[in-house]
Image (spheres, helix red, strand yellow):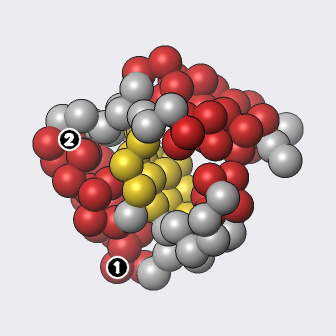
Amino acid sequence: MKKWQGLMGLCARAGRAKFGSEAAVAAVRGGTARLALVDGGASENTQKMFRDACDHHRVPLRVVPAGELGACTGRDGRMAAAVVDEGFAAHIVSLLDTENTH
């Protein structure tokens, strides 16, 4: 398991994330999201919806490899999440960006 996945699992157990496309995009549009994550296996329409919402509301967006978002939260099939805690969001972004540069 990658470090960001462990931290995302902890974030989920702490109740500091919203899951599912509707809840996550509502958090982005409502101003409570600090980070949006979309599974790479999500449809192009779902990914575009998140890109547009995150660009407009200036929320960082990361697309994670297919299946990893569901695996780290213990529920396969999850395609989207919004982290609503600033500390978790900053650390997850840092870990994802570090993993992608190595």
Q: Is residue 44 left or right of residue 3?
A: left
Q: Does the rendering let one see residue 21?
A: yes
* Residue 96 in view, yes or no: no
Q: Quadrant of residue 53?
A: bottom left
Q: Nearer the viewer, residue 6 or 45?
A: 6
Which residue corresponds to the image point at 57% horizontal and 74% vertical from the top-left?
Answer: 77
Q: Quadrant of residue 20?
A: bottom left
Under circle 2, the secondary element is helix
Q: Which mark is residue 58?
A: none
- Badge 1 is on which residue? 45
Q: Nearer the viewer, residue 14 or 41?
A: 14
Is the C terminus in the top left, top right, bottom left or bottom right quadrant?
A: top right
Tags 1 and 2 touching, CB below 8 Å: no
On screen, residue 35 versus residue 79, left or right, reads left
How far separated are the C-alphas under marks 1 and 2? 18 Å
Residue, disc 2: 57
Left or right position of 27 against 91: left
Instruction: Assess disc 2: are there few (<14), some (14-19) or many (≥20) residues with their C-alpha within 10 Å of its C-alpha.
Output: some
102 versus 82 height, above or below: above
Count of numbered badges drawn on the protein? 2
Q: Answer few, some or many: residues within 10 Å of disc 1's Cα (few below 14, many 20 plus, some between 14 and 19).
A: few
Q: Amino acid at mark 2?
A: His
Relative side of 22 to 42, left or right: left
Residue at 45% of width from left, 81% of height from top? 43
The location of residue 97, given as percent across then percent down, is 66, 35
**Tag 1 secondary structure:** helix
